[in-house]
Image (spheres, rainbow, N blue to C red):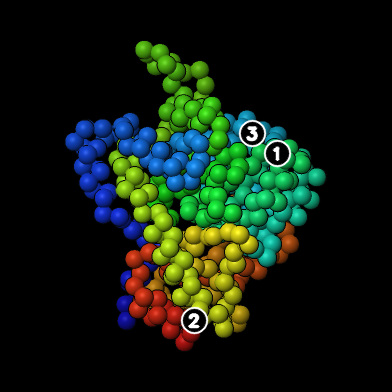
Amino acid sequence: MSNKISIFLSPPHMSGKELEYIKLAFESNYIAPVGEFIEKFEQSVCDFTKAKYACALVNGTSAIHLALRILGIGEGDKVLASTFTFIGSVTPILYQNAEPIFIDSDESWNIDPNLVEDAAKKEKPKALIFTHLYGQMAKIEELKQLADKYSFYLIEDAAEALGATYKNRQAGTFGDFGIYSFNGNKILTTSSGGVLVSHDKEWIEKAKFLSTQAKETFLWYEHREVGYNYRMSNILAAIGVAQMEVIEERVRRKREIFNTYKKKLSDIADFMPEIEKSRGNRWLTTLTFKDKEPLSVLKYLKKYGIESRPLWKPMHLQPVFKNAKAYANGRSEELFKKGLCLPSGTQIEDKQIEFIINKVKEC
Ligand SMILES: Cc1ncc(COP(=O)(O)O)c(C=O)c1O
């Protein structure tokens, strides 16, 4: 038996229109960086999410970095952040020389609003970056109330959650800023890419300015502040336009995949919950085993060419953040020890899911 992976965790799934749109970009010779697909892509994200303004960028991490920079967060400022997340959510706090303070999860697996309140009282943070983990909504109403009560900015990391909703409103549109990732493994992809959204026109104009090296509108190259080379290229935006056309279909299939696993494996595992009145996009099917050891399951699946992955290792347990403060309750550590992500690509066949389920059971 070979160890070669044949069923990936969450591979790209093209809609079929991508090459057609890339060809249009080539024909106009707007290869990079500017071109009409960038605006079209931003508009399609706004149309779908109902965010007012959007800025297309090279990835989700740069979107979080720009949000912090535009909110004026810098040295001496404290930023609360989900500990149970991917590192790209929080390293931008360090890029800005601010201090990350990590907050643990509650029974929803997402950030615990009670711990946020404890930290807000003591730390006087300037902002909170929280993740809608694996595509499921965090407790957004409680978090918004806390942001108002303790006067901090809210940055919604919806990198994994495009298409998730709470009371029919899209993830990423509740906070001062929202961000989406279009990395290769996300529900939609531009190979690599990100979008920053906000209700504030000036902030998004500033993001466009800073992401193009802060070039002033002079005939020559004039720069009065430090910017970045963060703007998305026209070619990747062309892929993004084609991808946005199929978002609802992708969410439907992700949820179907999740429901199939859940139905057949709930005697041996618990699955990530969804908060009331929300619809997760079920980007990845994630579970914790009642008895099995997740790394043994991972290795066993690998023998059959099936890719699986442990849940995120919490940020407050990462060596790189060993000196950071954390409001921890053991929840994310426990999830990390017991959990696994199963293949959730939207092109997976039902018989492949069946095969995976059988292999998990027999391990
Ligand atoms: C929760 C979360 N935040 C941020 C990011 C960063 O996005 P990107 O990889 O596009 O920089 C990712 C994923 O990659 C993510 O999963």
Check disc 3 and report its element: helix, strand or loop. Answer: loop
Placement of 207 over or under 215, stated as above or below: below
Which residue occupies the extreme front position in the image?
168
Disc assigned to residue 137: none
Between 187 and 259, the one lying in front of the other is 259
Picture quadrant of residue 121: top right
Placement of 108 over or under 113, stated as above or below: below
Which residue occupies the extreme left position in the image?
27
Residue under the image location 25 percent in, 43 percent down: 22
> Cβ(mark 2) to ligand 1 < 8 Å?
no
Residue placed under numbered mark 1 in the picture: 152
Disc assigned to residue 264: 2
Residue placed under numbered mark 3 in the picture: 73
Three-letter amino acid code of the residue under disc 3: Ile
Residue under the image location 77 percent in, 49 percent down: 117
Asked whether disc 2 touches disc 3, contact meaning CB atoms under 8 Å apart, the reply is: no
Q: CA distance from mark 3 to mark 1?
A: 11 Å
Residue under the image location 38 percent in, 59 percent down: 249
